[in-house]
Every structure is written in C-alpha cells, then in structure tokens.
C-alpha cells in the first residue's frame, strides 16, 4: 500500500518516521491527508499521529525544514507551519468522550491507532498509513475508508456522532459538495434526526463560525450551499442569509464573508460580528459594508480586498463610483465654504460620482456652482 503516499511527500514523511522510530515511537499519517493522497489530490495539510509524546518530532521538523511550531496543550497537538508551505498537525493517539451533546471532547491518550481512528468524523477520514521505515505506507483501515471512498459514501462511525459534534453536519455537506458523495442510508437517517433536533444549536457560535468559514472556502461553493438550503441549515449562520451568485466569482472565504455581509443590507454588521472575524478582517469588511449602505463614492481609497467585494456586489457601477471623491473638504474651505455647507456639498458630489455623472474635480466644481 506504500504507493498511496505520493512521491513528493516520501522523503519528508520517511524522515519524520525514521526520527520517530529512533525515539521509540510508532507514527502514522492519518485522516484527510490519506483520503486526498488516495484520490490523487494535492494537499498542504498533513495530520500525523504518534503513540507517545511527539514534541521532539515537532522540534525535529522545524530544525530540518524551517518553520514555526505552536502548541495546543488542551488536546496535546503541535501545529508546525513549514517554510516549504506544508502545514503539519502532530498529535498523540487519543480517545475522546463528550460530557454532553455539543461539548468539546474530553481527551485521554491511547496506544491503539484503531481507537484513535474511531473518534473521527467519517469512515473516509478514519484511515492511517504508517510512516516508519520498515512499514512505510502500510495501511490501517479498520472501518472501511477505502471501500467507502470507492463507493462515494459518507458514513459516520457511531450513532451519536452528529450529536457529539454537530459541526460534522456541516462537514458532511462540504464533502458531499466537494466530492459528489452521498450519505450512506443509516448516516442520512442519523443526519435527518440531528437536523430535526436542531443539533447545531448545541455548539458555541465560535465553533459554528469556524466551520462555516470552511464552507466558504470550498471550491464548489454552490453545491455546498444547495445542500445547506435543502436541509435548512443556513438559518444557523443567519436567519435571512441567502445564496448570492457572486460567491462563485470570489475565491477566498474572507471575500465571500464580505459579500454575504453586504448582501444582508442594514443587518450585515450584526451578522459579521456574530461570525467573530479577526479585527483586521472585520475592519476591512465593515469598510466595504459601509460603502454598500451609503451608496456614495468613498472619501478615501478602498483596498483591493474591498474593491473585489464591491465590484462583484455592484456589477453595473461606473468605474469612478468606487474611486475616492474627486473633491476634498479642504478644496471647499479654500473656496470659502464653511460649516455644514461643506458636508452638504461633498454629499452632492459623492452621490453624483457614484452615479457616474462626474469623474473630475472640474466637473465636481461645476456641479456645485464654483
């Protein structure tokens, strides 16, 4: 089975496995990376798991290939972003239990790879390949990942799966849209039960937002949205949220979030706040949303990010509509205009520029009688 691991990853994974073996550890590449390897898809996100403390392996990766290491102590995970562009997640074999539906898992470590695979979302991701030198590429597939991938089936590993972690509902629809897969009959029944019980209400808004941004990152975004609409799950993102054709014309989840914010009109800012974006992203999207609300040309130059969103949202705008106002407040002061008259005249100019009636300073001055 060693041929599943693409040649381009052989040296890196074999080096990690060889080092792990020197430490007395067993090591595997697991989950979505194995799925993508098998399907022939490129991936930069590789999950690795070990049957003991993996911190030294994380340090080894940084030393060998350069990069940055971060620790997530709650789950015993090290994330290493290598200088070559690969993102490695290094974890210990573990089991998870859930104190109540929708809770974050309680983790205990194990020595059995089969137990680690059982905690995963779907069988297609419950697949491991050894990276030790003597067993490199050897498959561990106790739940039929390869069989289900071949059949195009999404199957949960146990009946409480969608209630333990309701974000799996969104993940399942992402896989359905991305790969054209269908839910196995029992899994579809369990999904519909969780849907009727509105299981997604059980998770925090932060966890929902993280998973929804992954939805917005999907290349086949229309197919995923169709499923969200079919199962009435968009309401968990925002009650009045709808599909927007412009989503297919933007490529990043951040831009798509900005477009959806604009599409919600005067409640867009509330939606954006509820998605817990990082401050810089929130500022950028809010700037675009304010232009959508005011519908007059901006006073300052917009960023390329904001322009991409607004040009998709307003496809018929004249070119000068999104350019900075051709007339400044200081221009009016120099002409002897003061107080409220400045704001009133600027508003008239900005509206005319938005509508394409003027595009130069001279035309603006003529418009206001100067």
Image (cartoon, grey):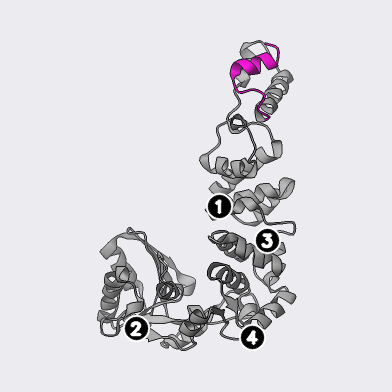
How packed mark 4 is, by other alpha carbons closer than 10 Å (few <14, some 14-19, many 20 or more), is few
Report the side of 40 relative to 293 (left or right). Answer: left
For the residues labelled 3 and 1, the Cα–Cα distance comes to 15 Å
Q: Earlier in the sequence, mark 3 or mark 4?
A: 4
Residue 222 x/y as whole percent: 61, 60
Q: Does the magenta stretch include residue 369?
A: yes
Q: Do the residues under discs 3 and 4 have CB atoms within 8 angstroms?
A: no
In terms of secondary structure, where does tag 2 sit?
Answer: loop
Q: Which of 92 and 360 is in front in this view?
A: 360
**Badge nearest the viewer, 1 or 4:** 4
Q: Earlier in the sequence, mark 2 or mark 1?
A: 2
Q: Residue at 41% across / 76% down in the picture?
A: 38
Q: Which of marks 1 and 4 is nearer the N terminus?
A: 4
Residue 2 x/y as whole percent: 32, 80
Report the side of 310 relative to 37 (left or right). Answer: right
For the residues labelled 2 and 1, the Cα–Cα distance comes to 38 Å
Q: What residue did someone put label 1 on?
A: 254
Q: In this view, does 129 lie above or below 324?
A: below
Q: What residue did someone put label 3 on?
A: 237
Q: State the mark number for residue 186.
A: 4
Quarter of the image for residue 141 reads: bottom left
How packed mark 2 is, by other alpha carbons closer than 10 Å (few <14, some 14-19, many 20 or more), is few
Q: What residue did someone put label 2 on?
A: 1
Quarter of the image for residue 122 reads: bottom right
Q: Residue at 60% across / 66% down in the picture?
A: 207
Report the side of 19 relative to 241 (left or right). Answer: left
Q: State the mark number for residue 200.
A: none
Q: Which of marks 4 and 2 is nearer the N terminus?
A: 2
* Residues shaded magenta: 355-370
Report the side of 288 relative to 49 (left or right). Answer: right
For the residues labelled 1 and 4, the Cα–Cα distance comes to 35 Å
């Amino acid at each position: 089975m060693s041929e599943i691991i693409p040649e381009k990853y052989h040296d890196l994974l074999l080096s990690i496995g060889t080092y792990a073996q020197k430490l007395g550890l067993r090591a595997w590449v697991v989950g979505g990376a194995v799925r993508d390897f098998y399907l022939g898809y490129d991936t930069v996100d590789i999950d690795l798991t070990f049957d003991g403390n993996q911190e030294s392996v994380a340090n080894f990766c940084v030393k060998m290939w350069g990069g940055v290491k971060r620790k997530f102590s709650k789950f015993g995970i090290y994330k290493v972003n290598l200088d070559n562009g690969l993102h490695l997640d290094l974890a210990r074999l573990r089991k998870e239990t859930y104190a109540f539906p929708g809770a974050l898992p309680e983790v205990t470590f194990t020595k059995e790879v089969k137990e680690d695979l059982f905690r995963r979302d779907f069988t297609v991701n419950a697949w491991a390949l050894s990276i030790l030198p003597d067993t490199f590429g050897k498959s561990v597939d106790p739940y039929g990942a390869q069989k289900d991938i071949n059949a195009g089936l999404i199957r949960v590993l146990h009946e409480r799966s969608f209630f333990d972690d309701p974000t799996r509902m969104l993940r399942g629809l992402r896989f359905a849209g991305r790969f054209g897969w269908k839910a196995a009959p029992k899994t579809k029944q369990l999904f519909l039960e969780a849907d009727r019980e509105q299981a997604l209400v059980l998770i925090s808004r932060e966890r929902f937002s993280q998973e929804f941004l992954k939805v917005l990152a999907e290349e086949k975004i229309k197919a995923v949205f169709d499923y969200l609409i079919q199962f009435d799950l968009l309401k968990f993102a925002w009650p009045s949220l709808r599909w927007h054709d412009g989503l297919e014309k933007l490529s990043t989840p951040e831009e798509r979030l900005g477009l959806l914010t604009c599409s919600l009109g005067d409640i867009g800012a509330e939606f954006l706040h509820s998605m817990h974006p990082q401050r810089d992203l929130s500022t950028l999207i809010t700037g675009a949303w304010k232009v959508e609300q005011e519908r007059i040309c901006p006073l300052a130059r917009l960023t390329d990010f904001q322009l991409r969103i607004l040009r998709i949202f307003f496809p018929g705008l004249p070119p000068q509509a999104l350019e900075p106002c051709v007339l400044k407040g200081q221009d009016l002061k120099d002409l002897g205009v003061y107080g409220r008259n400045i704001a009133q005249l600027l508003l008239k100019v900005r509206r005319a520029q938005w509508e394409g009636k003027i595009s130069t300073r001279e035309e603006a001055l003529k418009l206001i009688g100067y």
